[in-house]
Each structure stands twice: as structure tokens, then as C-alpha cells.
Amino acid sequence: MARNTRRTKALVAMAALTATGVALSGCTAGSGDDGGDGETLKLWHYEGADSAMGKAWAEAITIFEEETGATVEFEEKSFEQIQKTASQVLDTDAAPDLMEFNKGNATAGFLASTGLIADISDAVEEYGWDEKLAPSLQTTAKYDEAGVMGGDTWFGVPNYGEFVGVYYNEDAFAEAGLEIPTTYEEFVAVLDAFVAQGVTPLAEAGAEYPLGQLWYQLALLEGDRGFVDDYQLYKDEVDWQGPEVTAATETLKEYVDKGYIASDVSSVKAEDAGVSFINGTSPIFVSGSWWFGRFVTEATGFDWSMAAFPGADLSLGSSGNLWVVPENAANADLAYEFIDITMRPEIQAIIGNNGGLPVAADTADITDEKSAELIETFNGVLEADGLSFYPDWPAPGFYDVIVQELQGLVTGVQDVKTTNTNLGEQYDEGTAEYR
Amino acid sequence: MSRATTTGRTKLPPEQPSIPQRSGGTGAYWLYLLPGFVLLLVIVIVPLVWNLYLTFTKWRGVRSPEFIGLENWQKILTDSDFWTSFTNSVWMILAMVVVPTIVGLIVAALLFDVVGRKFGGKVGSFLRATYYLPQILPIAVAGIVIGWIVRPGGDGALNQILGWFGVPPYDWLGQMPSALIVLMVVMVWVQLGYPVVVFMAALQRVDPELYEAAELDGANWFQRFSAITMSIIRPEIFVVTLTCTIAALKVFGPVYIITRGGPAGATLVPAYYAYQEFFTKRNVGYGATIATVLTIVVVIVSIIFIRVQNSLERKERAGL
């Protein structure tokens, strides 16, 4: 009898737990049902609260709630989280109404081709966002049926831009008696001069994106817009033993051999490379504008500046990440209203004054001197139609391939030709379905 | 032996516990097994069959898979990265099974037979706990610490220590053989506690009089270890070897945290390779093929282990 009582209690406890679970899941479902009522905007983005964009979006949320009377249900996600799991979530009722997503063929293009994110061309026309975005910024927002960027259909809207340039520690240059280079020849001469003085000049990271970006920038030095179109938009075959790629791979190898880059670069992460610039160990860092705000805050022990890669007509860069509206969004209209607020000059100014690169700011609103310099440099790249995107965009997973192959190159495990062949094989395999 | 001497005096316990039989048959018992079968079906069998089906498809993870026949299976045969990953599995077995089991046996025997007897059980228990500590440390935390230790340049702890002896800094995780060696050393460190704890628990079954008798007969420590310890804890050795081998074949976390398969694929293992194909390249069909091969290998290894164990037990029972 006692045993039966215990068993009954256990069953009751289990039933209670189950009921609680059902009730909780019911609550979750209920929160999902809030969508579609025109009163709640379910928003996902992955910008840090202290970043330029994070601050701008926070202000946009406040304005949105004041003006529309609707509530923003914001969920902070990580970049990796959205990148790897969004495609599964977007196919369900749990999809948000508006989401920040990485731009490019393998990312936003993939979602567009699978019909998971909505064609927002009508909203773009209605709100006039296309008039605020420079043509080279529109490339990553528009895709064709196969998900290749540069198409005719709008699937996203960017609010900011980014590009890769060169950060210089001006104090270190002055101490070494060197000038900031303006041509590639001067750049190499500076690298030689630092090496001669026992300094490894370039902060680099072979375990993550910086080394691959330098490799692509070196290819862009040899290439033109036709090369970029072939590589990024699959206009024609890429010759993986051709002059652009060969020059890039050979030069990168030389950079290591000549001591421009540390010999132990293959296991260094981007964070470590950035920190070695911040703490003054490395006087030069080739990387993106996304470091700018952090350097303003942390690289305070010396004067520094940033410029486009010397001698290059083409720079890595693109629009920033995109606002995309999932096909399953319950409140698409609210999403469009929110996007429109983020395009307003006051929100754009927040981006610009915090180290970001606004795409539709009134220059008079940019009060921070250093930010104004950065925006001027970026505008110079835009005016020259110089944005050439990123090396890993053409195929899903090509980022890992580039990291792996360049590690093989800089550790001396494989030569230039083998590296190019391996890259080409993986590129061809990964892009086959888009061609 | 003991059974033969007691047969005439006492009643032997039955070989199997007596289960009262109902006249209505055993149908009702199936009801108790039903939840287990349902879970097995939902959690194991359905995903397994679905995974197998995906190996014949090309799928990006959303919408419908496209049937492509044996393409993925043909590709895997000539995929050098796949074979590299399985070669690295052999190194992982060395680091996670062979070394920890052998060292674990010796350590457990020493703790039980020498330390326990000379310094008391508490000292032995304390040392056992310290060996087990890496097992309870989250691999993400351990990975970050290992990253600091083997950091390149002069900042890393290992390079600093070696620097005191005039050894120049080395890029431990950035070079080909050393990255794999570092990973293996980490895995030995992580794994060692598991066999030590299991073997020490098994040694509780050993009658101390056996050791004393052997000692009186003049047996040294190694002779006692090989003749008594090894034979008595053989079932535990099988369990440890089998579970560690399975863990080594499907190791993922340490590779993900410490090396991400690099440099240049030097530390790629099948589970991480499958993950890359699943989530970064969105080749779900090919990722499923790698996962299926891994499953088949794990099942084959498990069957071999269990058969060998059963065969040895049969021989032991037969007095061979």
C-alpha cells in the first residue's frame, strides 16, 4: 500500500511536470501567435550593444515603438547562431518578422534562392531606399533566382557599409623615420625598412579571416572589375593559375619568407592580430573598418590612421549586413516601417559618429573628426566603384577552404601551384550549382 | 571448486532468479517495453534511416533533398580529406585509448597496491580525484587554457618556460606535426582519469589476501600486477577500451575548440569534417555519408570488442 502511494505520488509529480511543460510550450506558442496582429515586431540582430550599429538599432527601436505604438520583441543572437541555424528556423512559424543577415551568395543569396526570405522590391520602391544606396552597395542587396548577388530582385536592405584598408601606427612610422606609403612600391619599401630594423611590420592572422583577405587584396592589385565579376558573380571561369591568383599566392608566400609577416602566423587568430596593433607591437594592420571603433577606444597610446590599400583601385568591402524579411514573417509591414526608421539621417548619424560607415547620412551630422575621415575614405572607395566583396563569398564553406589552404602555403607544406589548384577545385565544386 | 565442495551439504542457489509465471502468458510484459521501443524508434532508428537516405541525396538543409544515387559514396572513396580524417582517428585512438588505458592501469594499480597500503586510503582517493579532474572540466574551458599555454610567440606559457632553457619560441598549433601532438597530449590528459577511476573501483573486488599470498610466494610488484590485477579487472579493461575507442572515433569538441581541424587539415577528424559539410558547406548529403561511415566503423569496432570479450570469457570459464 505504501509502495502504491509512492507510485501514485510519483505519477502525480510526473503529470504535474508534464503539464507544466505543456503550459510553458503553450506560452511559447502563444508568444509566437502574437505575431500577425500588427502590434508586435519580432526582431533578431547580432550587433553588440556597444557597437555603432547596436547603438543605432537601440535608438531605432525606441523611435519605432513611440511612433507606431507597436512593441518590439527583440532577441539578441550571435552571428554564428543566425548563420548556422537560421535556414532551419525560417522555414517554421518561429521565424521573426525582421532579421539581420550576412550578405553574399552563400548566405543571403542562399536564403533568397530557397524562398526563405521575401522579395521586398515593392517596399524598396515604395519607401525609396534604392535612391539612398550607391549602386555598388545595391549589389549585395539584390539577387537573381539562383541566389547570385547583383540580380534584379531586392531581398535585403543595408544600412551601413564596410571596407578593408590599412591601419598605420603613425608614431611607429615617425620613430622609424618612415612616411605613410601612398603607392604599393612605397608600401613594400616600408615593410623592408621595418624588417631591417628588426620589426615584423604586419599584424596578421592565419587561423581566421585576415590572411585570406590580404591574399584577395593582393589578387585585386593585379585584377580588374572583370576579375571580380568572374570570381564573385560567375560571369566567366576563374583561372586559378592565372596572373591574379598566382601573384596573390606568390606574394603572400614572399611576405612570410621576407619576414613582413611572422612565421607563426598560421595559428594566430584575428583578435590576436588586432591586439598586436592596439598594443603597438605591429605597426601595420590590413583589415576592415569594423575595427575602427575599437581602435578609437583602445589604441589610445599612439596616433594612428586608416587608408585604402596603397596602389589599389579595388578594395575588399561591401554593404554591411542586410535587413531581411523572412517569407514566414507575420508582420512584414511593421518590418518595413522599422527598416525605414533605420535609414533616417538621425539613426545614420549614430552609426557615423560611433565608428560605423553609414550609407545615407547627412555629412553635416557627423561631428566626430576621426569618423568623418573614415567616412571620407569609404566614400572615395565608393566613388571609384572600388568595392570588390570578400574572397569567401562565392561558395558555402569557402572560408574554411581559404584558411586551410593558406595555412598549408605559409607553413611550407604546399607550394603556390598546389595551393591555387586546391583552391580552384574547391571553388569550382562549391559554385557549380550557381553557374 | 567451491561449488563442488559444497554440493553435498547445502542447497545451491538457482542459476537464474526465479520469475513467477502467470497463466496469462507474457503479453503484459511487452507493455512495459513499449516506451523503450518508442524512444528507440524516435531517437535512434528513424534518424538513422533518414541519415542513410540522405547519403543518396544532394541537400542544402532546406526544402526537398535531390536524389543523386551513389555519388556521395563514390566521392568519399577518393576524398583525401576524408581519409586524412580517419588517419587522424587512429592517432586519437592512440591518445584516448591506448595510452590512457595502459597508464591508467599502472596508476590505478600503484594507487591501490602501493599508495593505498603505505599512505592510507585517503591519499589514494585524493590522487584518484586529481586524475579525474580534467574529465569534469568543460572542454571549452580546457581548450581556452590550452590555447594560452601553447600560444605562438613569446607570450605562451610553454614557449616562456622553454625560453628559460634557450629554446626559441615555437608555433605549436600552427605547424603540422606539433598541432596533432598537442591535441593528443591534451586528450591523454583529459582521458586518463576515466580508466583510473574505473580500474580503482574494479580493484576493490580483489581480495587483499591474494596479494599477500603472492608476496609471500616471492612475487614482485609487476608479477602481482600481471597475474592478479590484470586477470581480475579484465571486464573493466574491456569496458574502458570499448567506450574510449568509440569516444576517440567520434571526437569533436577538442578539435573544434583547439584547432578547428587546422593547420591545413592536419587535425581534421571525421566528426568535425562531417560538421563542416553539414553546417558550413551545406552539403548535408555528403555530411550524412561521412556520419554514416563513422557509425558503421563504430558499430563494427563495438561488435569486434564484444565478440573478443565473450570469447575470452568462454575460454576462462572453460579453464583454458
Image (cartoon, coloured by chain):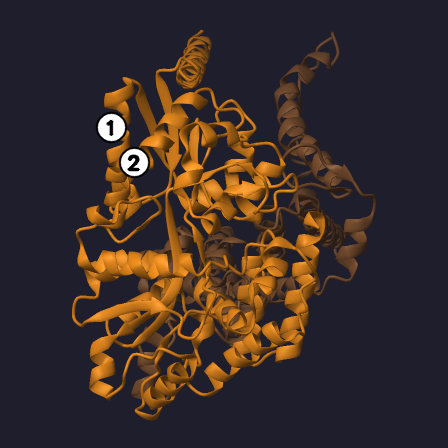
How far, Cα to Cα, is label 1 from label 2? 11 Å
Picture disc at residue A386: none
Relative image position of residue A227 (x, y in whole percent)? 60, 64
Q: Which residue is depicted at the point 59% across and 66% down? A: B265
Let me know if residue B137 appears in the view: no
1 or 2: mark nearer the eye: 2
Q: Chain of mark 2?
A: A
Q: Which residue is depicted at the point 61% across and 60% down? A: A231
Q: Which residue is depicted at the point 70% across and 10% down? A: B22
Picture disc at residue A344: 2
Total labels: the figure holds 2
Q: Is residue A343 shown above or below A379?
A: above
Q: Mark 1 or mark 2: which comes first in sequence? A: 1
The answer to which image quadrant residue B50 occupies is top right
Relative depth, front residue between A70 and A298 = A70
Name, please, the residue furthest toward the right: B69
**Is disc 1 in contact with disc 2, using a CB cutoff of under 8 Å?**
yes
Relative image position of residue B11 (x, y in whole percent)? 65, 31
User: Could you tell me which quadrant the C terminus of chain B lies in?
Assistant: bottom right
Relative image position of residue B117 (x, y in whole percent)? 37, 63
Give the orange chain's letter: A
- The amino acid type of the residue labelled 2 equals Arg
Label 1 secondary element? helix
**What hue does chain B carry in this figure?**
brown
- The amino acid type of the residue labelled 1 equals Ile
Picture disc at residue A63: 1
Relative depth, front residue between A197 and B199 = A197
Let me know if residue A412 appears in the view: yes
Q: Is residue A56 shown above or below A120?
A: below
Q: Which residue is depicted at the point 39% across and 41% down? A: A132
Q: Chain of mark 1?
A: A
